[in-house]
Image: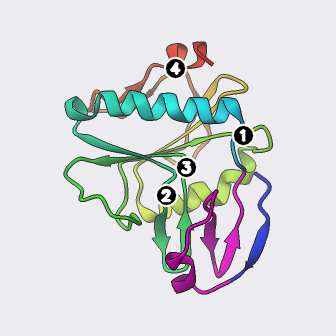
Amino acid sequence: MEVMIVHEMTEQEYCKYFWEPDKEYVDGKLLERNVGRWKHGHLQAILAEWFRSNRKEWNIQVGTEVRIKIADGRYRIPDVVILSADLEAEEIITRPPLLVIEVLSPEDSISEYSQRIADFRAMGIPHIWILDPYLGAALDMSDGRLCLVTELKIPGTDIHIPLPEVFEVL
């Protein structure tokens, strides 16, 4: 994920404005994000639709590209965010979501995601998944290790992604 620093600004300025596409904010710097291509956007839409269609049964809320305040001076924007339905949705999320999902773009690499994953873990987000629509691969980064998986599921719940079905339609 090639990140371009746009310019420095205060956290208050960052929270006041939104850009198209939105940018992340890390340690006083406004950062560009890779804007997805077709497979990236298509997979993001499939995931959002999948979780939304199961939201009542799984007691969840779904968002895409929502700002998360990791800590003072640090904001990340994952591709898909899953909140417990019991958690009040905020315009900028300040409490740990149940799950965040990142969808890789062709320019992205897992090693470049290490700081993002560290930020999500530091905030206390229990489930962190990365999907690569170009390789048809999924990674569970929830425990901080790179785990290539054939199934993505939150233990103790029915929350899951049917990976073969999802990658088949791409």
Asked if labels 2 and 3 touch by Cβ distance under 8 angstroms, the answer is: yes
Q: Circle 1 — which element?
A: loop
- Residue highlighted by disc 1: 105
Q: What label sits on residue 163 in the rendered view? A: 4
Residue drawn at (51%, 85%) of the image: 12
Which residue is more in the foreground, 158 or 60? Answer: 60
Disc 4 to disc 1, how far (Cα)?
18 Å
Neighbor class of circle 3 (other Cα within 10 Å; few <14, some 14-19, many 20+) is: some
Mark closer to the observer (4, 3) = 4
Mark 4 or 1: in front is 1
Q: In this rendering, is residue 66 above or below 149?
A: below
Q: Where is the C terminus found, in terms of image quarters?
A: top right
Q: Dot 2 corresponds to which residue? A: 121
The amino acid beneath tag 3 is: Gly
Amino acid identity at mark 2: Arg
The mark nearer the N terminus, 1 or 3, is 1
**Span of residues in magenta:** 9-34
Q: Nearer the viewer, mark 1 or mark 3?
A: 1
The amino acid type of the residue labelled 1 equals Ser
In the picture, measured across the screen, residue 30 lies left or right of residue 145, that is right
Q: Earlier in the sequence, mark 1 or mark 2?
A: 1
Whether 167 is among the magenta residues is: no
Residue plotted at (49% across, 62% down): 67
Q: Which mark is residue 4?
A: none
CA gap, disc 4 to disc 3? 21 Å
Asked which quadrant contains residue 157, the reply is top left
Pointer 3: what residue? Answer: 144
Give above or below for 110 relative to 170.
Answer: below
Instruction: Say which element carries label 2.
Output: helix
Mark 2 touches mark 4? (CB < 8 Å): no
Residue 71 vs residue 28, the one in the foreground:
28
